Amino acid sequence: MDKRPIGMFDSGIGGLTVLKEVKRVLPNEEIIYLGDTKRFPYGSKSKEAIIETSRNCIKYLIEKNAKLIVIACGTATSQSLDILKKEFDIPIIGIIEPTIYYLQKNVKSKETIGVIATQGTIRSNAWKEKILEKLPNVEVKSEETPLLATMAEQGWTSNKVAKYTIKEYMKCFKKINRLILGCTHYPLFELLIRKELNKKVDIINTGEKVASYLKEYLQNEKKESNNEEKSFKIYLTDKETNFANVAQKLLEQEVNIEEANF
C-alpha cells in the first residue's frame, strides 16, 4: 500500500484525457497533474528542449511526493522517456509502452496500424520503431497532424474548423486496421475521427491503455492506494490560458488550479 499521489504532466490540456481514464480505473488514487502551459506546445520544440523541460516537470512532481510519474504527453514520451528513466530512481511511465502492451495482446499479423501525432513525435520515429520491435509483421503508417493540439487547447474540437481539419488528416487512413491517437490531445477529436474512418477501425485512446497498464503495475508492485476521496490537484506553469474552461468540460466538474513556479 502506498498512499502517495501519482504525478502526471503534459504541455497542456491533452494529458487530462489520461487523468480522466486513470481516475475512472483507479478511483482511490490521488493524482497531481502538472500542465506546463508556459512552454506549450512541445511538438515543435527541439529534442534537447523537450528533455530539459520534462526533467524539470519530473523534479517538480517529485517535490510533491509523487510515488511514480506518468508522462501524459506523446511528444515528451517519444523524445525524453528513455533518457529520463536512467536519470531518476522513481518509476516513469509514458504513453507508448502501455499502448504497445495492448497491441501485443490484440493485433494479428499483417495488420496496418496508423499513428497520428505531433511533428516532434512522428519525426522521432519512436512509435514506429517500438511497434515494429514487438510486432515485426505489421505495417505502420505515421502522419504528422500538428494543428490538432493547438486547436484542442482552444476548445476547437467540434466546430467547422475541427471537422474540416480532421477530414483532411484522415484521407490517408482509409485502409488501416487501427489508429493510435499518439498525442494525448487527440481523444478530444475522437468522435470526428470515427466519422471519417471505417467503423471497424480500432481507434486507440492512449489514456485508456495507460490507465489499464497502471492498474496492473500498481497491483504487481503493491503500491495501490486506498484513499477514500477521489482527489486530484492541477498545477499550471501559466494560468493565463483557456485551460480551465476546456478542463471543466472534459472532466465534467469544477476544477481548481494552482500555479507552479519553475
Image (spheres, rainbow, N blue to C red):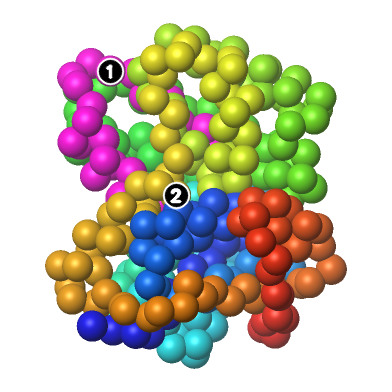
Residue 48: quadrant of the picture: bottom right
| Front-lying residue, 137 or 188 | 188
Mark 1–mark 2 contact, CB under 8 Å?
A: no
Q: Is residue 212 left or right of residue 186?
A: left
Q: Residue furthest right?
A: 240
Query: Mark 2 = which residue?
Result: 207
Q: Identity of the amino acid at label 2? A: Gly
User: Residue shown at 43%/88% (left/top)?
Assistant: 65
Q: Is residue 130 magenta?
A: no
Query: Mark 1 = which residue?
Result: 111
**Can you see residue 111?**
yes
> How many neighbours does mark 2 have within 10 angstroms: few (below 14), some (14-19), or many (20 or more)?
many
Q: Earlier in the sequence, mark 1 or mark 2?
A: 1
Q: Return the x and y of residue 55 as percentages of the image width and height.
A: 50, 74
User: Residue shown at 31%/52% (left/top)?
Assistant: 212
The secondary element bearing badge 1 is classed as loop
Q: Quadrant of the N terminus?
A: bottom left
Q: Nearer the viewer, mark 1 or mark 2?
A: 2
